[in-house]
Image (spheres, rainbow, N blue to C red):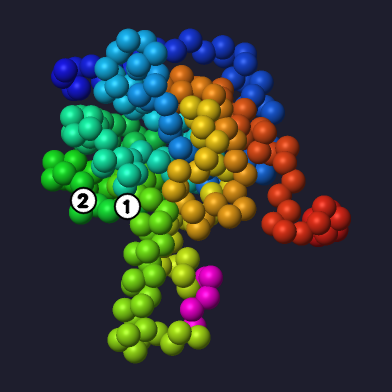
Amino acid sequence: MSLENDAQPVIMSTDNTTMEKLLESIDRNRLPRHVAIIMDGNGRWATSRGLERSQGHIEGVNTVRRITEIASEVGVECLTLYAFSTENWNRPKAEVDALMHLIGIAIQRETPDLIKNNVRLTMIGDFGRMPEDARKRLQGCFDDTAHCTGLVLNLALSYSGRWDISRAARDIAREVADGALNPDEIDESLFASRLSTAKLPVQDPDLLIRTGGEVRVSNFLLWEITYTEIEVTDKFWPDFTKEDFLKAIISYQKRERRFGKTSQQITNQ
């Protein structure tokens, strides 16, 4: 299968009236600044249609394009997409190789549009574990979009929450061993500053969306999602639309975020 030839956008019908109503329903003063998404269901989407799992990943790339566009349009500051976990390296080699290849060519193909839309691409995860070709294409996009000042599109690749926490703990331990850090200085703020998400404009997601119907966080942003609002949909990622994204934001805006306080305390603020 030629991923370059098959990775073409799928034209999905859009009800402009519905989109306009949803956009009008959103309170632009209460937007989630950072939205994280567990993009689940690519393989199941393909299998349910009698297709190879790789075809689901191809369609998933098209969804990434759609959701990046709408997130940028409404004014979200950071969009973190869980694209490949450290555990995903254990999948069949053929699927992993195809996905790594797809990620590389998709990023290279989308770079001009990212620049046009003022979107900056970043990544969290074990960059050194990525195949050389994918690394080069990703680095090229990082460099080419570094000047962009709009939405930050942050890909979680070869990433897991436990991996990141363990890595941060090792770095802090080395600083203590070298005498550069007093153990008494270690608090939540310092630890958070050593996580790979510290470079993002907003470290902790306000909203986490999971597609595919599974109700778990799958080792994603374990430190950062302590008080994140969670939205789960049964839709597989390739079927997730701009309208679905806007509905998730509207659902988020209806919630009361208390951060451990009471409703009365929040009201009196």
Find disc 2 in the rendering and name its residue.
Answer: 129
Residue 194 percent across, percent down from the top left? 40, 67
Q: Crowding near pointer 2: few (<14 within 10 Å), some, many (20+)?
A: few
Q: Residue at x 32, y 85 (%)?
A: 177
Residue 138 percent across, percent down from the top left? 23, 43
Task: Answer above or below: position of 171 versus 112.
Answer: below
Specify the segment rendered in magenta. Answer: 185-189
Residue 132, quarter of picture: top left
Residue 28, quarter of picture: top right
Task: Answer above or below: position of 205 versus 254.
Answer: below
Q: Is residue 90 left or right of residue 49?
A: left
> Quick one: quadrant of the C terminus?
bottom right
> Quick one: quadrant of the N terminus?
top left
Assign a secondary structure to mark 1. Answer: loop
Measure how far apart labels 1 and 2 are at the Cα level: 9 Å
- Are discs 1 and 2 less than 8 Å apart at CB? yes
Q: Residue at x 29, y 32 (%)?
A: 110
Q: Which mark is residue 125?
A: 1
Q: Nearer the viewer, residue 145 or 37?
A: 37
Task: Report the amino acid beneath label 2.
Answer: Arg
Q: Crowding near pointer 1: few (<14 within 10 Å), some, many (20+)?
A: many
Residue 184 percent across, percent down from the top left? 50, 86
Q: Residue at x 81, y 56 (%)?
A: 262
Q: Is residue 218 visible?
A: yes
Task: Report the amino acid beneath label 1.
Answer: Gly
Q: Is residue 123 visible?
A: no
Q: Which mark is residue 187?
A: none
Task: Answer above or below: position of 69 versus 45.
Answer: below
Q: Nearer the viewer, residue 188 or 242?
A: 188
Q: Is residue 156 left or right of residue 213?
A: left
